[in-house]
Image (spheres, rainbow, N blue to C red):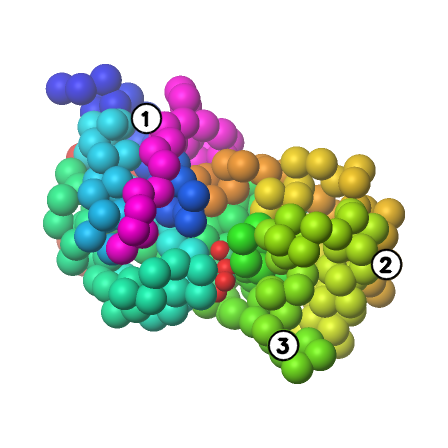
Amino acid sequence: MTSADQQASENPNLALGIDIGGTGTKGGLVDLTTGSLVGKRFRLDTPQPATPENMIEVVVQVADHFAFDGPTGVAYPGVVLDGVTRTAANLDKSWIGTSLADRVGTRLRGPSVYLNDADAAGLAEAHYGAGRGVQGVVVVVTFGTGIGIAMINNGELVANSELGHLELDGKDAEKGAAASARERDGISWKEWGARADRYLKTLENLVWPKLFILGGGISKNPEKWVQYLSPRTPFKVAELINNAGIVGAADAAWMEHRASARQLVEHRGGNLAVTAED
Ligand code: BGC
């Protein structure tokens, strides 16, 4: 028994989260009673070319590092439906139509789920971070290489909303307002803030959330940009920063695992007691 297996049998509330990104893929074991990482994260650079073949090997290597046989959640930076990738805005287009469930899931030691990376970050914030306990619609916006959106209603995720791509001035909004646009265009935080502000004001007129949670790479240094934003909607800076994708992916896997254990128990007519062996 590896030490991660040992941990899983001792703590049924552990799951592994893996966050696939354009520059790196990182993973961590998460205790879902607190939403915190157990032990260290493990990260590998994204190989070039970033094709599914190359990147899937990296995802499996990250999983193997933990030698964990409990539930695993994998977050991907595009739409994921039924374990299959449907878009690849900032990745090699050959990713579209890849079944992560078939190509990664069959190589993992435990059950697995697949979801969009912003959705993962949104779940993490809703359950363990800045959105905890908030009723109504919360929109989590991640500003990174692209713009990711998670729509949460009363703590439940409405998956795969892609409002980072809404049209602004005749262009895909994320091209101008993603965090990467600041570096690419060599603009100041103030100029970037004006773009992000305009994006949020457009978004809030379409979905009218109770709260915005602003995450992604920019949540590391909010003092650089918060003063430039004035949407009507109250906003908070994301709390889980770099680990939101990992924590949310693990959370999705853990919830799914508990739901299927519950169904199994109900089917057998017993009471729910989820253990690592279920
Ligand atoms: C993708 C989203 C993703 C976001 C952040 C966007 O370009 O379309 O699916 O969540 O980038 O990675």
Residues packed near mark 3 inside 10 Å, few (<14), some (14 to 19) or many (20 plus):
few
Who is closer to the viewer here, 34 or 79?
79
| Marks 1 and 2 in Cβ contact (< 8 Å) | no
Distance of label 1 from label 3 (alpha carbons): 48 Å
Answer with left or right where residue 133 lies relative to residue 251: right
Q: Earlier in the sequence, mark 1 or mark 3?
A: 1
Residue at 63 percent of width and 77 percent of height:
171
Q: Amino acid at mark 3?
A: Lys
Of the two numbered discs 1 and 2 in the rendering, the one whose residue sits closer to the viewer: 2
Quadrant where the image shows the C terminus: top left
Is mark 1 in CB contact (under 8 Å) with mark 3? no
Question: Is residue 54 visible in the rendered structure shown here?
Answer: yes
Q: Residue at x 78, y 48 (%)?
A: 188
- Expressed as whole percent of the image width and height from the top left, the position of residue 116 reads 42, 58
| Residue 255 in the image, given as x and y percentages of width and height | 37, 49
Amino acid type for the residue under numbered disc 1: Asn
- The residue to which callout 1 is attached is 11
The location of residue 117, given as percent across then percent down, is 45, 53
Give the residue number, with chain letter if any, for mark 3: 171
Neighbours of disc 1 within 10 Å: few (<14), some (14-19), many (20+): some
Q: Amino acid at mark 2?
A: Ser
Span highlighted in magenta in the image? 28-51
Q: Is residue 56 magenta?
A: no
The answer to which of 34 and 199 lies nearer the viewer is 199
Which of the two labelled residues, at mark 2 and mark 3, occupies the earlier sequence position? 3
Name the residue tied to disc 2. Answer: 230
In the image, residue 242 sits, relative to residue 176, either above or below, namely above
